[in-house]
């Protein structure tokens, strides 16, 4: 396996690990807050569950970019390409937007979800507004996802 192929695989791995770490943190802190609300009022379960799940999307985005990158280099079909170092570095760099933004936005979306769970705890009728606060953080993960997909697909292999 060439060094370029190893670099490309490293990019895919970073997309999964870093974006997944952001989601794991975000879903974890939001889940802690949600559990507190549900212990007081079980009828709010569905609303706080949605708020807890929102930070989980960054990990999915990282996984999607990794699948695209691994498919691009032929690893998923069992015939990995012998990439040049330059091509491998380009794929690695293309995976970094979702890796880094996924990490940071997942963590911040989790914190925003905690605050939104607090809104639902006190005023459940304000659920849509609470969800919008959390969804706004998602915008940047989606932009990073788009850039990573476009960049990975633009690398000549």
Image (cartoon, grey):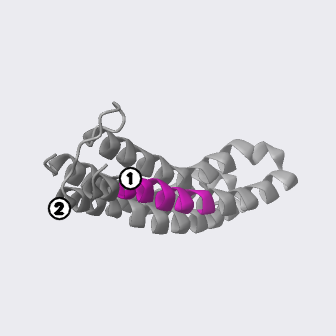
Q: In the orientation shown, which residue stands out farthest toward the top?
A: 77
Q: Position of residue 2 (x, y in %)?
A: 27, 53
| Residue 101 position (above or below residue 13) | below
Mark 2 residue crowding within 10 angstroms, few (<14) / some (14–19) / many (20+): some
Q: In the orientation shown, which residue stands out farthest toward the front?
A: 1
For residue 124, side relative to residue 100 (left or right)? right
- Give the camera-side residue of 124 and 48: 48
Q: Can residue 70 be seen at all in this image of the molecule?
A: yes
Q: Is residue 150 magenta?
A: no
Q: Is residue 24 magenta?
A: yes
Q: Position of residue 106 (x, y in %)?
A: 51, 62
Q: Which residue is mark 2?
A: 86
- Give the camera-side residue of 32 and 15: 15
Counting residues from the start of the chain, the first of labels 1 and 2 encountered is: 1
Q: Which residues are magenta?
A: 10-25
Q: Can residue 139 be seen at all in this image of the molecule?
A: no
Q: Position of residue 92 (x, y in %)?
A: 30, 60
| Residue 69 position (above or below residue 86) | above
Q: Which mark is residue 12?
A: 1
């Amino acid at each position: 396996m060439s060094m370029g192929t190893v670099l490309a695989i490293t990019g895919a791995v970073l997309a999964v690990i870093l974006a997944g770490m952001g989601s794991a943190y975000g879903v974890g802190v939001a889940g802690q807050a949600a559990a507190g609300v549900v212990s007081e009022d079980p009828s709010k379960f569905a609303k706080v569950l949605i708020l807890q799940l929102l930070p989980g999307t960054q990990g999915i985005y990282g996984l999607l970019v990794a699948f695209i990158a691994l498919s691009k280099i032929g690893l998923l079909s069992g015939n990995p390409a012998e990439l040049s170092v330059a091509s491998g570095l380009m794929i690695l760099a293309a995976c970094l937007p979702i890796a880094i933004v996924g990490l940071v936005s997942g963590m911040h979306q989790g914190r925003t979800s905690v605050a939104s769970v607090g809104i639902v705890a006190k005023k459940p009728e304000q659920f849509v507004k609470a969800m919008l606060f959390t969804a706004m953080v998602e915008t940047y993960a989606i932009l990073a996802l788009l850039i990573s997909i476009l960049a990975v697909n633009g690398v000549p292999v």
